[in-house]
Image: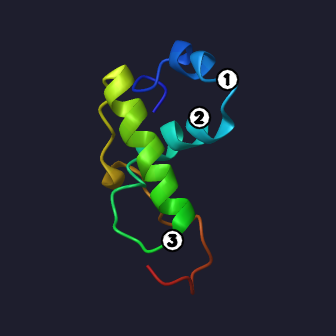
Amino acid sequence: MARSLPLKYIRKQRGASSQIEAMFFGQAGMLEETLDCHYYRFMQQEYRFLKHKFDLLPLDYLLYKNLRIRPSNFPM
């Protein structure tokens, strides 16, 4: 994640916390779904703009291993 999102890009957007958040979620591959949530659509819109501006390539969501970070009865 750190290699895919250079610190200089985060510093350039330091005045807009929503854009920084969108960069992190987008680079993590967590903005790929189609949901009917206003905030989620806003994050997708922000990330699309930043992706084009900085020529970002998002990571694959499957790279993150969520195994054993939730209780054993958590549905996956």
Q: Considering depth in this image, is 38 or 2 the residue closer to the camera? A: 38
Q: Residues within 10 Å of mark 1 (few under 14, many from 20)?
A: few
Q: Which residue is tagged 1?
A: 14
Checking the image for residue 20, the label placed there is 2
Q: Quadrant of residue 7?
A: top right
Q: How far apart are the two marked residues, 2 and 1, measured between alpha carbons? A: 7 Å
Indicate the secondary structure of the residue bearing disc 3: loop
Q: Which residue is tagged 3?
A: 37
Three-letter code, disc 3: Cys
Label pair 2/1, CB-CB below 8 angstroms: yes
Residue at screen point 33% across, 57% down: 32
Q: Considering depth in this image, is 13 or 4 the residue closer to the camera? A: 13
Rendered position, 32 above or below 10: below
Three-letter code, disc 1: Arg
Does 24 sit left or right of 34 as displayed? right
Three-letter code, disc 2: Ile
Q: Judge whether residue 52 can be spotted in this image.
A: yes
- Which numbered disc, 3 or 2, marks the residue that appears first in the sequence? 2
Q: How far apart are the two marked residues, 3 and 1, measured between alpha carbons? A: 25 Å
- Which numbered disc, 3 or 1, marks the residue that appears first in the sequence? 1
Q: Quadrant of the N terminus?
A: top left
